[in-house]
Amino acid sequence: MKNRKYWTDERILLSSVLFYAHKQNNYVSEADNMQKGVNTMKHDDEMVLKDIQKNTQMGMTAIDTILDKIGNDEFSITLSRQSLHYADIHNRALNRILQQEGEGYRSSQISEMMLKGSIHANTAFNISTEHLAEMMIQGSNRGITSMWKSLKHNGLAEKETVELAKELMDFEEKSIEALKEYL
C-alpha cells in the first residue's frame, strides 16, 4: 500500500514538472514566434475565450432544450433573444481565437447529453414558467461564477478578451433581471 502511495505522489510530482516545463517551452516558442512576426495566441487568452465559448454553448443548449417545454409565448421570445445574444458572443470569441490561430472550444457529446438530461429530469414534474425561469437564473449564476474564475486564473489575458468576458457577464446579469419577471 505504501508503494502505491509513493508511486502516486511521484507521478503527481512528475506531471507537475512536465507541465511546468511544457509551459516554459511554450513561452519560449511564443517569444521566438513574436520575433519572427508569427501571430500566436497567449495561453490565458485562449483559456478565457474557450470558457466564453463553453459558457455560451451551454446557455444556447439549455435554451434550446427548454424552448419545447414553454407554454408562455412572451417567455419563449425572451429566451430566443437571449440565445441569439449567446450565439453572437460565442462567434466573436471563436473569431478572436481563429484570428490568433488558436484552437476553439469543442463540447463533448457526453457533457451536452448530461446538460440536456439534467434539464429533462428537473422538468419531469414541473414545467411551469416560474420553474423554467428559476432554472435559467441558476444557470446564468453558474455562468457568471465560471467566468469570474476564468478571469482570476488567467490574469494575463489581453484587454479585448477580458472585455468580451465582462460583456458576457453583464449580459448574464441582465438576463437574470429579465427572467426575474417570470418568477
Image: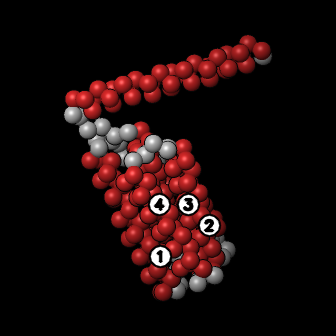
Contact? badges 1 and 2 (CB < 8 Å): no
User: Quick one: label 4, few (<14), some, or many (20+) residues within 10 Å?
Assistant: some
Can I make out residue 65 in this image? Answer: no
Q: Which residue is mark 3?
A: 144
First of labels 4, 1 by sequence position: 1
180 or 127: nearer the eye?
Answer: 180
First of labels 2, 4 by sequence position: 2
- Is the C terminus in the top left, top right, bottom left or bottom right quadrant? bottom right
Q: Is residue 67 left or right of residue 158?
A: right
Spatial CA distance of label 2 from label 4 is 18 Å
Spatial CA distance of label 4 from label 1 is 20 Å
Q: Amino acid at mark 4?
A: Lys
Label 3 residue SS: helix
Q: Is residue 175 left or right of residue 160?
A: right
- Residue 161 at x, y percent in the picture: 40, 52
Write the residue at 44% across / 73% down: 82
- Is the N terminus in the top left, top right, bottom left or bottom right quadrant? top right
Write the residue at 47% across / 69% down: 171
Residue 138's disc is 2
Contact? badges 2 and 4 (CB < 8 Å): no
User: Quick one: label 1, few (<14), some, or many (20+) residues within 10 Å?
Assistant: many
First of labels 3, 2 by sequence position: 2
Spatial CA distance of label 4 from label 3 is 9 Å
Label 4 residue SS: helix
Q: Amino acid at mark 1?
A: Leu
Q: What count of labels does the image hold?
A: 4
State which mark lies toward you, 4 or 1. 4
Can I make out residue 154 in this image? Answer: yes
